[in-house]
Amino acid sequence: MTDAPLSPCVNICVIHPEAGICIGCHRTRDEIGVWGGLTNAERRAIMDGLADRAGLLKKRRGGRAGKLGRRGAAAAK
């Protein structure tokens, strides 16, 4: 067993503007802010619910390439 602190961080630290959670680890700003002061039991309790939050994030639709593809599909109709 390791003594490293528990963390779901995957070094993709961007807060989704609508969902209010990090797109990398799915924690809220508040959870990220207090993380260092939490016990491992408190961290585990938060981490147990993170996978359920992934659905709050909208899937990207392909950026510029997706937009160009949608334009082409609309023109073909």
Image: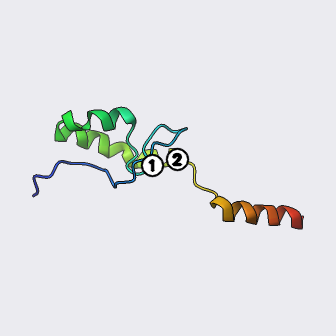
| Residue tagged 1 | 23
Q: Position of residue 15 (x, y in %)?
A: 45, 42
Q: Amino acid at mark 2?
A: Leu
Secondary structure state at the residue bearing disc 1: loop
| Residue tagged 2 | 57
Location of residue 44 with respect to 70 vertically, above or below: above
Q: Residue at x 64, y 59 (%)?
A: 63
Name the side, left or right, on which 23 lies relative to 34.
right
Closer to viewer: mark 2 or mark 1: 1
Q: Residue at x 57, y 49 (%)?
A: 58
Name the side, left or right, on which 47 lies relative to 56.
left
Q: Amino acid at mark 1?
A: Ile
Secondary structure state at the residue bearing disc 2: loop
Name the side, left or right, on which 15 lies relative to 31.
right
Location of residue 1 with respect to 43 vertically, above or below: below
Location of residue 63 with respect to 47 vertically, above or below: below
Q: Position of residue 5 (x, y in %)?
A: 17, 48
Q: Position of residue 68 (x, y in %)?
A: 74, 64
Q: Position of residue 42 (x, y in %)?
A: 22, 36
What is the spatial separation of the Cα atoms under label 2 and label 1, in whole angstroms? 7 Å
Q: Residue at x 74, y 66 (%)?
A: 69
Name the side, left or right, on which 77 lies relative to 57.
right
Q: Quadrant of the C terminus?
A: bottom right
Badge 2 vs badge 1, beta-carbon distance below 8 Å: yes
Q: Quadrant of residue 76?
A: bottom right
